[in-house]
Amino acid sequence: MTGFLLRMPLLVLLVGLAAVLMLAPAGFASVTGYAAIARNFFYAALLTLTFCGLIGLAAQANPRGQTAREMLLLMLGVYGVLPLLLAVPFAESQPDTGFFNAWWEMVSSLTTTGASLYSADLLPLPLHLWRSMVGWMGGFFVLVAAVAILAPLRVGGFEIMSNPYGREEYREHLPPSDQPRRPVLHLSDPSFDTQLADPASRLGRAALQVGPLYLGFTLVLWVGLLMLGDPSFVALTRAMGTLSTSGISPVIGPSGEASGIPGEMLVFIFLIPALSRRFWPGGAELRATERLIEDPELRMALGLVLGVGVMLFLRHFLGAIEVDRAAPPDPTGMAEVGRALSAMWGSMFSALSYLTTTGWTSVAWAGARSWSGLDAPGLVLAGLALMGGGIATTAGGVKLLRVYALATHGQREMERIIHPHSVSGGGRIARRLRREGAYLAFIFFMLFAISIALVVSLVSIHAIEFETATILSIAALTNAGPLASAIPLTPAFEGTAGIASAPWEGWSGLPDFTKAVLACAMVLGRIETLAVLALFSPEFWRR
């Protein structure tokens, strides 16, 4: 059986795995009184598994391995083909929505964008579970594909730390002189393990390394939220949405109202793995420092969360001064202190949430806005989503290591203005980040800016306001779908997704062409522009 599975195409295996996972919402729907939805998911799983088996049998006669470059096509195929199959039971369970809207919803979930066309209170619970599971699978695939597919090709952020001279001794410690050297086997040597260089085997090993930790984090967060008071279903979807940074929620508004601020503190801790690859197996070449406390991504994230949190708190504090002048005086002042602390926590939690492109909203966020009478700072949240989280994590955006490389390069250039003949320090890794790393980061940043301009232009073809088009484009390219609902936008009413649609959220009322453009932007933001451009290189297709 194992040999049969190993000889199957990887895309077929992934489709079969998705079909097996369809049985979970089928079972949940059968015990919660949604018999028709249970049948739709069960029949879709059975039909998909049948076709996967037939294709697998046909592929047994002539098994063919895949090269590392072809794995990039596999990654593109996952986001192009898999949502079409994942949308079948969703479209059958929501007949008035149409297959196109169901496909869009699955693209949004699989890319961990988390944008939705539907109102949470009008969608059945099994469909909420399916959206959360698809987003959770999408986060797991990103963690695995980053080290198994993107790392060998030096794209997806790995190009920042790669040595342009093809040597790795600058990052690796030399062995002690008393230890004998290990002979390096040639490819023609019979004892050379070809499985280590096989892309499919590398993908499987990465999945076995990341999978237990990813599942364990999800279960621990689920149990923790249950103990803090969240309902079982909300806690499960919240745990999956946190680890995958999809931000998919089955309720309207903040999903942590039952557990409150203690639940948000627990979620805050589990959002930290989206800031650096250090918390996940693989990706050792991304470590710029040996010590965790000196990690540039974590230090930059800490500065951003604290700085933005304090800035937003002062914004609400100054606004509350004007509000309190018209309110009756509080003799003790404890109510104002409680509101201030609540506003401070809401600002910090929202800053980390949007920095990791998750998009959770704090339960204290609405209280802080009512305390000060101010609207949500849309540009600040959009700026955090643009920076994004760590490289090779589930977060989207430009990524913190690229921002750090550009910042250190700018600092070094200003030092050279004052001291033209100075020599930069920090070691070889720091110098590489300031020179080659900053150069590649600047290229990616400009490509990302061009992508935003292109998507905004395509979205603005229809009668959509420029501010709305800009925020929707940024939300799609940074895979931060909840950003559109956190900022007041002027909704469009040129399309619909059925009776359960929510056009006031900014997505559902868009025309089909605009939705298709934004879906492509989600895939582009997840795979990253440099990886997509590599597909158009002649070197990529040369044998």
Image: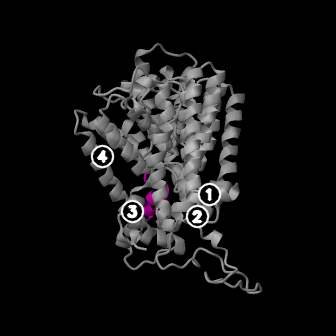
| Mark 2 to mark 3 CA distance (whole Å) | 27 Å
Cα separation between marks 3 and 1: 29 Å
Q: Does label 1 or label 2 sit earlier along the sequence?
A: 1
State the residue at coordinates (52%, 42%). 352
Q: Amino acid at mark 1?
A: Arg
Which badge, 3 or 1, is on the more N-terminal residue?
1
Looking at the image, residue 222 sits to the left or right of residue 456; the answer is right
Q: Which residue is mark 4?
A: 455
**Would you name the residue on which mark 1 appears?**
278
Mark 1 → mark 4, Cα distance in angstroms: 33 Å
Residue at (55, 38) in percent of width and height: 47
* Left or right of 56 on screen, residue 419: left
Q: Determine which residue is flagged by label 2.
A: 287
Q: CA distance from mark 1 to mark 2?
A: 7 Å
Label 4 secondary element = helix
Of residues 321 and 543, which is closer to you in this image? Answer: 543
Q: Is residue 499 left or right of residue 65?
A: left
Quadrant containing the C terminus is: bottom left
Q: Is 258 covered by the magenta stretch?
A: no
Which span of residues is magenta-colored?
A: 397-408
Q: Earlier in the sequence, mark 2 or mark 4?
A: 2
Q: Quadrant of the N terminus?
A: bottom right
The reply to whether residue 394 is in sight is yes
Say whether disc 2 or disc 3 marks the residue closer to the N-terminus: 2
Q: Which element type, helix, strand or loop, lies under badge 2?
A: loop
- Residue on which disc 3 sits: 535
Q: Position of residue 350 (x, y in %)?
A: 50, 37
